[in-house]
Every structure is written in C-alpha cells, then in structure tokens.
Image (cartoon, rainbow, N blue to C red):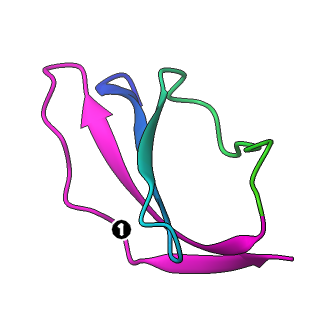
Amino acid sequence: MSELAGYEIYMLAESTGVSSVITVSDPFSTSRSIDGLTPDIYHFAISAIDSSGLVSELSTLVSKTVP
C-alpha cells in the first residue's frame, strides 16, 4: 500500500448528464459517502492513483438509483 496515493471516484447523473470527480487522498479509505444527491440514476467508476501520479484504468461501472 505504500505506493498507493489515493483514488478518484467518477460520477455521472444519467438524466442531467452532470458529471464530477471526487478525489480521495487517503489510500486506506475503503468507503465514501456522497451527500446531497437529487433523485436520478447515478453511474460510478473508480481509479487508483499511485505515488508517482500514475492513474489506473477505470473499474467496472456500477449504478445506483436515488429515489
């Protein structure tokens, strides 16, 4: 884990097309809450960032419906 610097969470709201990237700079973090989401279907993917700034390929896309 010493080479892992953190993560980037990529989020896309399906109906509006609004996207954002959340940077997690704690490499030991295994969960993240995202507050203030409006009703929509959200798609998420994650990449890892190492201490040299290299970014991994995106994870498998997952989706969540916020009622």
Check disc 1 and report the residue beneath it: 59
Q: How many marks?
A: 1
Left or right of 61, for residue 58: left
Q: Is residue 13 left or right of residue 58?
A: right
Of the pair 38 and 53, the residue shown nearer to us: 38
| 47 part of magenta stretch | yes
Residue closer to the observer: 41 or 8: 41
* Range of magenta residues: 39-67
Residue 23 pos. (x, y %): 45, 30
Toward which corner of the image does residue 67 lie, by quadrant?
bottom right
| Residue 48 coordinates in the image, percent (x, y) | 33, 44
Q: Is residue 22 above or below residue 20?
A: above
Q: Secondary structure at mark 1?
A: loop
Residue farthest toward the right in the current orientation of the protein: 67
| Coordinates of residue 53 in the picture (x, y in percent) | 16, 24
Q: Residue at x 78, y 69 (%)?
A: 39
Establish if 51 lies above or below 35.
above
- What is the x, y in percent for residue 29? 64, 34
Quadrant including the N terminus = top left
Q: From the viewer's perspective, is 47 left or right of 19?
A: left
Name the residue located 50 percent from the left edge and 28 percent from the top edge: 27
The residue at the point 53 percent across, 76 percent down is 15
Badge 1: residue crowd in 10 Å (few <14, some 14–19, many ≥20): few
Considering only vertical position in the picture, is 43 above or below 10? below
Residue 32: say if magenta: no
Q: Amino acid at mark 1?
A: Ser
Residue at (80%, 42%) from the top-left corner? 35
Residue 10 visible in the displayed image: no
In-front residue for pair 34/30:
34
| Apparent side of residue 66 relative to residue 1 in the rendered image (left or right) | right
